[in-house]
């Protein structure tokens, strides 16, 4: 444990700049506290003393949520005007979170009738608040960038499919040469494969079998495309591990409906397989697989790669003193911080226990140290309330290893772990390199 740090951080996380949250409160100290805490997670707060003074700001800016602080010391009847004013904002498509020192059923009912979607009591659990904001932020994204590999040797047809995918916000790549498909799958890492059943000089049935032989590709949906509506061929395609069979010509709307359905289902199933249930980060096995893939990519493209291993200082004390629920909250807090402060294409995972890992793509050792050190400062300033009385501030230690200094995934992991051990031995709350 440590006292709250006054250190400042200059690192600007690579997240959208329009992550605004409005806060209405008469308490300037509370406004300052909330602003400082959720700013660590990449959100921007605009404060107002009352709803009326916020009306113009809501009209001029995009926001995902309004945090409404219900003043202390007022009775339920005195809150009526506040709920009336808030209810008028429902047309603004804002998620409304109420915050109060009181917690009773009648107050919660009034907040729901006023359009509230969440209710927090003081001292507010910042991790829970950020969880709610993250859910809103994710749902506000219009398109998720899925990757589709089109295995088709007719250029006109393949280009048409590619155009349809791209118009739907997806990344699409064509594989016209059957002999190079496996290499493209390894390089492109598609979320779904569209495969023609007839290609010159190729047995697509054997090609599908080859893809399904590789564990990393078992969960990738394969949609077969055929110009013949042959029932026996449909059965064969499904027996090969295909997920659907479409007959050409295919309308764009029909094709996209099937593709989206398969992608969403695959995303959900894959999430259960590769995600840690508490933090929603990649689990140990999934992270190791991606680490090996990225090392190979860096070798081919001659780029840099940095692996950071983090361990929360005195984490056992948190569990022993406050219980495992408090420890879980701290882990989730650090997980959210890493996800918000790192770039969207960096990879974050849970290695086990309180040890988290971050893979920084195309990132040198010097850059990685700067980034992780600034995240360390952010984490040290986050207030946790494990017993709802006084705040608890924690730190983490970090070890960093880099490619090409270390040439494979095993060496990177071992050296980052050794650097983490040195960081702990040197007094904790610091970043060391291998």
Image (cartoon, rainbow, N blue to C red):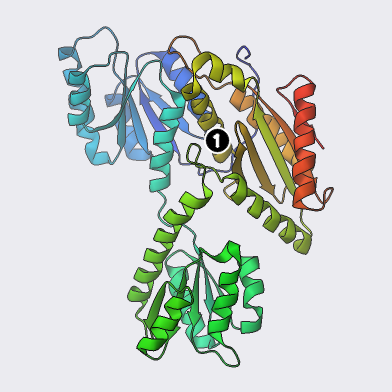
Position above or below: 160 against 396:
below
Q: Is residue 279 left or right of residue 251?
A: right
Q: Residue at x 52, y 76 (%)?
A: 150
Q: Position of residue 273 (x, y in %)?
A: 50, 52
Q: Position of residue 185 (x, y in %)?
A: 61, 70
Q: Residue at x 18, y 25 (%)?
A: 109
Q: Nearer the viewer, residue 200 or 134?
A: 200
Q: Position of residue 252 (x, y in %)?
A: 36, 77
Quadrant of res 5: top right
Report the residue marked by disc 1: 335
Q: Nearer the viewer, residue 353 or 124?
A: 353
Position above or below: 3 against 280:
above
Q: Residue at x 50, y 89 (%)?
A: 198
The single residue placed furthest to the top in the displayed view is 73
Q: How many marks?
A: 1
The quadrant in which the N terminus is found is top right
Q: Is residue 261 left or right of residue 207?
A: left
Q: Is residue 74 left or right of residue 38?
A: left
Q: Residues within 10 Å of mark 1 (few under 14, many from 20)?
A: many
Q: Residue at x 62, y 11 (%)?
A: 3
Position above or below: 149 against 295:
below
Q: Position of residue 83 (x, y in %)?
A: 20, 24
Residue 69 can be seen in this image: yes
The quadrant in which the C terminus is found is top right
């Amino acid at each position: 444990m440590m006292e709250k740090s006054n250190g400042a951080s200059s690192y600007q996380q690579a997240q959208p700049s329009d992550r605004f949250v409005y806060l209405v409160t008469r308490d300037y100290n509370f406004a300052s506290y909330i602003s400082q805490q959720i700013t660590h997670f990449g959100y921007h707060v605009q404060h107002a003393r009352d709803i009326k003074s916020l009306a113009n700001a809501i009209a001029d800016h995009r926001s995902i949520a309004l945090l409404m602080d219900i003043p202390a010391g007022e009775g339920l009847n005195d809150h009526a005007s506040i709920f009336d004013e808030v209810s008028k904002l429902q047309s603004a498509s804002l998620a409304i979170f109420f915050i109060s020192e009181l917690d009773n059923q009648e107050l919660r009912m009034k907040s729901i009738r006023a359009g509230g979607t969440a209710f927090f009591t003081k001292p507010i659990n910042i991790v829970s608040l950020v969880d709610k904001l993250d859910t809103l932020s994710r749902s506000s994204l219009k398109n998720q960038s899925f990757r589709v590999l089109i295995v088709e040797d007719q250029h006109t047809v393949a280009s048409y499919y590619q155009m349809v995918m791209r118009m739907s916000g997806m990344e699409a790549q064509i594989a016209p040469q059957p002999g190079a498909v496996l290499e493209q799958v390894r390089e492109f890492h598609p979320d779904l494969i569209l495969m023609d059943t007839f290609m010159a000089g190729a047995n697509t049935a054997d090609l599908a079998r080859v893809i399904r032989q590789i564990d990393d590709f078992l969960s990738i949906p394969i949609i077969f495309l055929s110009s013949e509506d042959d029932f026996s061929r449909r059965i064969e395609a499904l027996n090969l591990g295909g997920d659907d069979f479409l007959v050409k010509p295919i309308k764009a709307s029909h094709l996209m409906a099937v593709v989206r359905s398969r992608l969403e289902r695959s995303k959900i199933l894959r999430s259960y397989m590769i995600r840690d249930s508490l933090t929603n980060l990649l689990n140990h096995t999934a992270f190791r697989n991606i680490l090996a893939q990225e090392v190979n990519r860096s070798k081919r493209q001659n780029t840099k790669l940095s692996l950071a291993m983090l361990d929360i200082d005195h984490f056992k004390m948190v569990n022993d003193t406050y219980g495992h629920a408090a420890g879980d909250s701290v882990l989730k807090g650090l997980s959210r911080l890493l996800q918000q402060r790192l770039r969207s294409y960096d990879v974050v995972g849970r290695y086990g226990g309180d040890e988290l890992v971050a893979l920084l793509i195309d990132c040198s050792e010097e850059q990685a140290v700067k980034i992780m050190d600034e995240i360390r400062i952010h984490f040290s300033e986050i207030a946790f309330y494990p017993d709802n009385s006084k705040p608890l501030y924690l730190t983490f230690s970090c070890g960093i290893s880099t490619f090409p200094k270390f040439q494979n995934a095993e060496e990177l992991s071992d050296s980052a772990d050794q650097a983490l051990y040195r960081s702990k031995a040197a007094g904790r709350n610091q970043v060391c390199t291998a």
